[in-house]
Image (cartoon, helix red, strand yellow):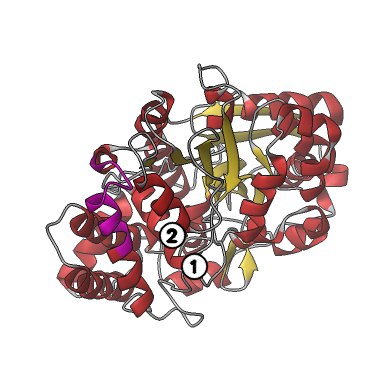
Amino acid sequence: MTELRSGSLRTRLVTVAAAAIAAGLLISGCGGGAAPQGAEQAAAADPASGANASGSVNICGVKDASGIYKGTAEAFTKANGKVTAKYTEIGATTDEARTQIVQRLEGKSTECDIFLTDVIWTSEFASQGWLLDQTKLVEANKDRLIPSTVETTKYQDKYWASPFFTNAGLVYYQKDKVAKPETWQQLYAEAAKAPGNGYVYQGKQYEGLTVNFLEMLYSAGGEVLDDKGDVAIDSPETREVLDFMSNGLKNGSADRAVLTYNEDPARLAYESGDFGYQRNWPHVYRLLNATSLAGSFGVAPLPAWEGGKASGVLGGWNLAISAHATNQSGAVAFIDFATTPEWQKHVAMDYSQAPVNEAAYSDAAVLQKMPFATELLASVKGAKPRPISPVYPQISQAIYKNVYAVLSGTASAEDAVKKMAEEITTAKASF
């Protein structure tokens, strides 16, 4: 799942784009030609082709820690009969997998028919013409997919992948210490009331901080890019959220150690029993139930901003068909299988991941294994994608670097907002 595995942004995209700025050249982030032409010239996947598929299909991606990717390939092979599927690991971490995927796509490799793609890669990959246009396939399957998950596959009004499983943040809370949070303001107030009530989250200088910040910004009514793609982060909402997060560290609502936390350290801190609230991903539920906290905690959707509404930030993984796939029909057949309501139940029951099919969340067998499914569905349906842009890595870096500066006390909210807006504007101009 995307428990924020896109942390390091020392990617080829950043390096090449930076070089382009220095040289004053208008080129794409990864050297694939002008972005709009790449997307416009892409071939389209035929949703009808899967019915007559045969041969073998190779799915490539990150290390399969939970077994979900290999398990899906095996189940598809068993159910299909005419097509065999295998999963090939090409990176131990998300960043390593991305590097390997980019190398294959740039080199027009035919090794992989499908790439498992992080939701934040869609715009970049599509803009290069590296993927098949899946618009017709997604539209054919749209009635089985949660709308917010479909949005993570969109670029320039087309769909470039199919959602496989999704992710949205949740709040875990100690029921004997603190109340279920309805608003962020209530959560922070409860957290500051007494020692042992505090809040832990992902505040390290990486992608996770971008997500934690955006969850509040979106719920406060703010945005990074407006509907036209223009930079909109220089706003009263951004200043309000930054001041709120900063004050939370000053008054003890959140422990200052969060400035060093990504997902696992935040979870381990909460498991100590010394905190009342934790923001983390759905997979933490299973891990918490293997500790002394089993039975003592509740799970809630992300709270709303006071006067606004709750809004999460979607994570998850999608299935993208390579523009150089040798078995496009087999790829279509695999995607059809992986997104069926029946298999999506297994995504939840067998692998503790968040399905992209809404019906799975109310299935009795799923609820037995994932009793917080109702809360999770609320978070997924209310969540928004991260800013959609081929230069998203630079945008995220501008956000988390400047948010961290405010939280650590090295910059004012006013200065950070101005700098964020400038850096995001520069990043967009590089493409």
Whether residue 65 is visible here, answered yes or no, is no
Where is mark 1, residue-wise?
A: 306
Amino acid type, callout 2: Gln
- The spot of residue 309 in percent (x, y) is 57, 67
Cα distance, mark 1 to mark 2?
A: 7 Å
Q: Residues within 10 Å of mark 2 (few under 14, many from 20)?
A: some
408 or 20, which lies in front? Answer: 408
Q: Are marks 1 and 2 in contact (CB under 8 Å)?
A: yes
Q: Which residues are magenta?
A: 244-256
Which residue is at a point 82% across and 23% down the rendered structure image?
Answer: 78
Residue 396, picture quadrant: bottom left
Image quarter (top left, top right, bottom left or bottom right) of the C terminus: bottom left
- The spot of residue 333 in percent (x, y) is 79, 42
215 or 158, which lies in front? Answer: 215
Q: Is residue 84 left or right of residue 266?
A: right
Residue furthest front in the image: 194
Whether residue 207 is visible here, answered yes or no, is yes
